[in-house]
Image (cartoon, coloured by chain):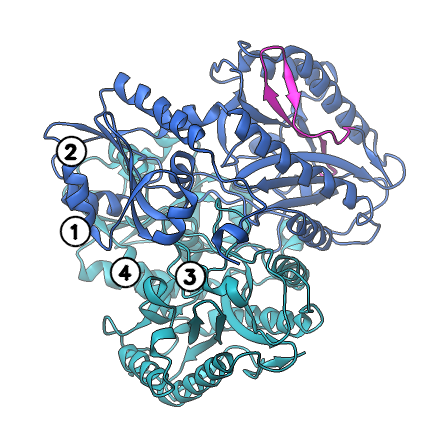
Chain colours: A blue, B cyan
């Protein structure tokens, strides 16, 4: 087995795909008068080059991009079609970067993730350049998925459907959330899950799976999510807990598929017996109605605010405004988030600011309701924005899974 | 179940522990003439406050520390003994920070992880302050573990021993690395593993478990580790792969325990049948000799360089210098790394720079040998530095696990 054979079950990013992405970035660089982009974050490097190896990606406004590879040269060569030069240290990097930069040139960098000390080190290399933040630009480019990317996202979604299907056998009375989560995560991994999920930004952490039942869905935490779970330690402070499954109380399984870099993120309700409280049923029915309504409303050109307002109005009509997307201090201001190589991509589906949906955007849509002292109920599905409407990523039904 | 009940199986960080840690930081701040530290990274906030909630931790050189909590206020109150004030936005944070800072004061921040755009936003708040990097100071303080921390690390180590014990039933001829890894990870999770491992810095990613067999141990990647594994996708580029277990070829299981924040990291060799190649046996025997020799050498006051040199000299004597800690370009310059709330803590056991071992340091020690076109062999154990010598974190034997 060599690298190629080892990775033979995954698609490498096609060259035309890379070329198109870089062209898009250059168009945006031109608008902002940026002469060169120096890309340093691993996910962005992967997006624009096809490899995640330790390197510096130079994208000059004119001419070909260049990947300065520190480690591993051999693997980067196999994975990326971009021109490459091996470097061993900052001094060698400097030598190559200097050939590209001219005095007074604006240089684009991902300032949302680049640590201060790394920029200071680079300033010794590219001293005197004006540094512009291109992170928003990169995130906007990445928000529009190609058909290649959508094919990867659909494969990621197949892992989600499979795990939901398997979950039917594992959600049992008396079982602990964390044990169900561990078993299902393992099944996902054995069926193509890449093992990790990525979330952009300082302190952004994400578990692969949240099995959250009853009261633990109401325990708040730091994350910008409607439901965090209690977790098993204050050192992580989220995720499945030691809470045991009871009859009549919905278990939410919120699972992040991840295949060849691409993340999906859906939630289904698993219920043993009948609804133990009418609020749970109402929460489910309202979430179901919101999703089916939005499915008929969303498409290329529609404003995300409209979708958020529509969902909120349905929640109000069901008398669930207080419970919509959390409760009290834990309420979040969005009902959907973009998906791709990271789980917090654009667009954000919120009432707070206008975003026009565009063809190729992919987002998770998660109407959820939290009932203090009781639990939570809700659903999450992933949509691809098309000219004609919204396409579902997975085909796993929205119905409550009755056990 | 409330937060307290939900987390009842984990210890909260004791108040005296927090007080001692803050006192240590203040001593170091005094030496560097730093008037206030503004701590923003979740792990450092957890270390100095006991909670991981979204907040800003102010540690002034005089007076009590203050936690400005954005989310979740209720949970932070339960988890941390530090004085707290809820904040809703930057404006409110500014109001509180301003009470602490004086013109010309030096302000300590974790510049190794704080993104540039976050610092720029804060500069609007604390404009005019001189910002000093306190990340090295914090990492040095965190390198010395208290007995409370060591007790947590030992519980983390128990998960590692348990997973190695279980592995005996899962390493079977014809099984894929990734399937074994998935099952074992699941067992660790069901037995107290917190679910994630943390590695400090941009682009630092780590899987919980590496099941690496034969040739896939020789496939290089970006990480600063002797053995990465092939992984299943270029988008992650490390970890267990689809490679199947063969008789006579050692399987390395490199597993990171993580309990209540604290990480352990050990490797054992699993072998079906007899050694299929004499180099594997030599690698194992050499690794075993290095560990037992170092166990008699290391203690408080000993220089880490001495340990590295000792290991290297044993490798040379066995004729394995070329294979020691990787091969060719993939060779790393260290043989051990500090463990704690992150997997890349201090000390680094390397020949490159002098570090004196101090009582309370905890490090993973990993003599490993890579044989191109064949595979790898090696061990990894965790040591606590004591006055009298090195104490093992786990009691799982170093012997090859024969199957």
- From this view, report whether residue B113 is shown above or below residue A343: below
Instruction: Judge if badges 4 and 3 mark residues of a common chain.
Output: yes
- From this view, report whether residue B249 is shown above or below residue A169: below
Q: Which residue is mark 4?
A: B137
From the viewer's perspective, is the residue at label 2 or at label 3 nearer? 2
Task: Say which mark, if any, is on residue A262.
Answer: none
Residue A78, position in %: x, y?
A: 42, 47
Q: Regarding mark 2 in the picture, which secondary structure is present there?
A: loop
How many discs appear? 4
Query: Which stretch did the figure color magenta?
Result: A373-398
- Which residue reaches farthest right? A273
Q: For mark 4, name the chain.
A: B
Q: Nearer the viewer, residue A116 or A81?
A: A81
Instruction: Find residue B399 and report its image quarter.
Output: bottom right
Instruction: Find residue A339 and report its image quarter.
Output: top right
Instruction: Find residue A111 and report its image quarter.
Output: top left
From the viewer's perspective, is the residue at label 4 or at label 3 nearer? 4
Q: Which residue is mark 3?
A: B18
Q: Which residue is mark 2?
A: A101
Q: For mark 1, name the chain.
A: A
**Taking A151 as reference, is A20 left or right?**
left
Q: Nearer the viewer, residue B172 or A363?
A: B172
């Amino acid at each position: 087995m060599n690298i190629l054979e080892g990775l033979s079950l995954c698609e490498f990013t096609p060259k035309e795909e890379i070329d198109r992405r870089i062209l898009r970035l250059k168009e945006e660089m031109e608008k902002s008068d940026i002469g060169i982009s120096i890309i340093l974050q691993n996910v962005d490097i992967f997006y624009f080059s096809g490899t995640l190896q330790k390197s510096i990606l130079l994208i000059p406004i004119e001419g070909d991009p260049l990947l300065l590879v520190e480690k591993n040269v051999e693997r980067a060569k196999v994975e990326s079609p971009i021109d490459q030069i091996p470097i061993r240290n900052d001094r060698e990097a400097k030598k190559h970067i200097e050939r590209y930069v001219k005095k007074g040139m604006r240089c684009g960098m991902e300032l949302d993730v680049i640590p201060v000390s790394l920029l200071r080190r680079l300033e010794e290399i590219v001293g005197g350049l004006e540094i512009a933040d291109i992170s928003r630009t990169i995130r906007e480019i990445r928000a529009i998925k190609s058909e290649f990317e959508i094919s990867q996202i659909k494969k990621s979604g197949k892992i989600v459907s499979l795990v939901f299907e398997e979950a039917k056998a594992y959600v049992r009375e008396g079982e602990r959330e964390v044990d169900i989560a561990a078993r299902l995560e393992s099944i996902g991994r054995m069926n193509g899950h890449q093992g990790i999920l990525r979330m952009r930004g300082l302190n952004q952490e994400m578990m692969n799976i949240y099995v959250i039942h009853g009261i633990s869905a109401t325990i708040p935490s730091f994350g910008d999510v409607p439901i965090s779970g209690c977790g098993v330690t204050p050192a992580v402070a989220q995720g499945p807990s030691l809470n045991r499954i009871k009859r009549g109380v919905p278990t939410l399984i919120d699972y992040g598929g991840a295949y060849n870099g691409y993340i999906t993120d859906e939630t289904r309700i698993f219920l043993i017996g009948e609804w133990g409280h009418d609020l749970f049923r109402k929460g489910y029915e309202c979430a179901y109605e919101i999703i089916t309504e939005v499915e008929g409303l969303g498409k290329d050109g529609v404003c995300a605010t409209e979708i958020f307002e529509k969902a909120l109005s349905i929640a109000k009509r069901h008398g669930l405004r207080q419970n919509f997307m959390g409760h009290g201090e834990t309420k979040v201001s969005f009902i959907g988030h973009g998906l791709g190589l990271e789980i917090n991509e654009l667009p954000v589906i919120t009432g707070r600011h206008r975003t026009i949906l565009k063809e190729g955007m992919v987002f998770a849509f998660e109407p959820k309701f939290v009932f203090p002292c009781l639990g939570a109920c809700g659903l999450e599905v992933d949509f691809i924005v098309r000219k004609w409407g919204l396409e579902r990523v997975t085909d796993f039904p929205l119905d409550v899974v009755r056990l």
